[in-house]
Amino acid sequence: MTTYSQLPGRRLSPHAVGVGLRSPHYQSALENEDLARSLKPDFVEVHAENFFARGGISTHLLAQVREKYALSIHGTSLGLGSYAGISPTHLNSIKNLNARVEPHLFSDHAAFTFAEMNGLSIHSGDLLPVELTEKSIATFEANINKVQDTLGRTILLENICTYVPASLFSTQSDDYSEPEFLAEICKRTGCGLLIDLNNLVVNAVNEQEKRIDHYTYNWLSQIPPQYVGEYHLAGCALVKPGEIMVDDHSEEISQPVWDAYEQALTLIGPRPTLLEWDTQLPSWEKLLLEASKIREFAQQALHHE
C-alpha cells in the first residue's frame, strides 16, 4: 500500500462548511457579492461526471468556480466495489479532471456500478450495495489502490443508502458490520471515509429501526475517528411507517440527521461538512442560510462537550 495525503497546503479546516453546487445556482455563486461574509461557504462540491469535458463552457465554468471557492469533487460512477473493476476510460477522465482543478477533496461511493455481461461492461445507472465480505473488501482494495495510484492522492469513500434487505442481494453471510467493513477498507488502502449522516438515517428508517438515534450512535461508535475526512448532511421527503424512504435531498436537514451530526461531533470530532440539496432546490441565499445553521450547530455542540 502506497501512502498518500491531500495536496500540500490545500487542506480544509475541520470546521469548514460547504454546499453542493448545482446548475441552477452557478450564476448566483459566481456573481453574488452582496452576501454577508458569514454566509459564504468555505467550499463547494460538484459532481465529477458533469465536468469531464476538456474544453467548452463546463471547463470554463469550473475554472471560474475554482478561482472563487475551495473545491470538492464528488464522483458517482467509479464503482469502487465492482468485481468487474474500474473502467479505464472513466478513471482517465477522473485523472484529467483532478489534474486540471486540484480539488481539496475527492470522493466516491462504497458501491458497485459496473458488471460484465456477455463480454460487455455494463453500467447499472445507480449506486448498488455490496456484500460485506472478505471477497468484497479485496475488490475495494484493488480498485481503490488503482484509483489512488492513478491520482497520486487519498480519496474518500462514502457509505450509501440501501433499499432492500441485505439477504436479497447477498449470496453468503456477511463477515462484517457495515462500519467494520468500511474501516477495514480504510486500514488496507489508506483511503478515508465520507460519512453521509442522512444515508444512515434513511437506512435506519428502511430497516424499521425503532430508535434511529441508537442505530446511528452504534454505527458511528464503530468508526475509528482517524479514518473520517468529511461529513454530508441532507434532508429528504418524509414517509409513513413501513414505507421506503428515498434519499432524494429535497428538504431541510431533518431532526434525526441533526441528532446524528451531534453524535458524530462527539464520537469522532469536527470534519469538513457539506450540505447536499439536489431536488426542489431553494434559492442560493436560502441554501447558504441552511449551511450557516450547520456552522452554528457545530459550534454549540462542540462548546457544550
Image (cartoon, rainbow, N blue to C red):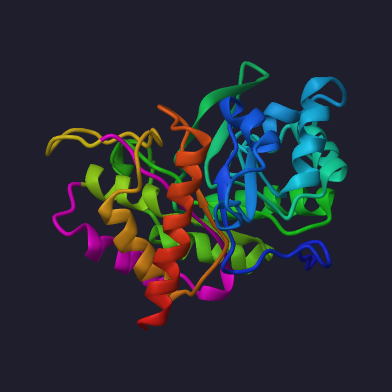
Q: Is residue 189 left or right of residue 272?
A: right
**Residue at x 39%, y 42% (from the top left corner):** 161
Image spot of residue 92 (x, y percent): 82, 35
Which of these two is toward me, 2 or 170? 2
Where is 105 relative to 62, above or below?
Answer: below
Which of these two is toward me, 270 or 174? 270
Q: Quadrant of the N terminus?
A: bottom right
Which of these two is toward me, 27 or 182? 27
Q: Is residue 229 magenta?
A: yes
**Residue at x 43%, y 68% (from the top left corner):** 298
The magenta region covers 208-237
Residue that lies at the very extreme toward the bottom in this rendered image: 305
Where is 188 relative to 139, above or below?
Answer: below
Image spot of residue 106 (x, y percent): 69, 50
Residue that lies at the very extreme toward the top in this rendered image: 118
Q: Is residue 81 left or right of residue 260?
A: right
**Residue at x 75%, y 46% (from the top left corner):** 68
Image spot of residue 259 (x, y percent): 29, 62
Q: Is residue 67 left or right of residue 267?
A: right
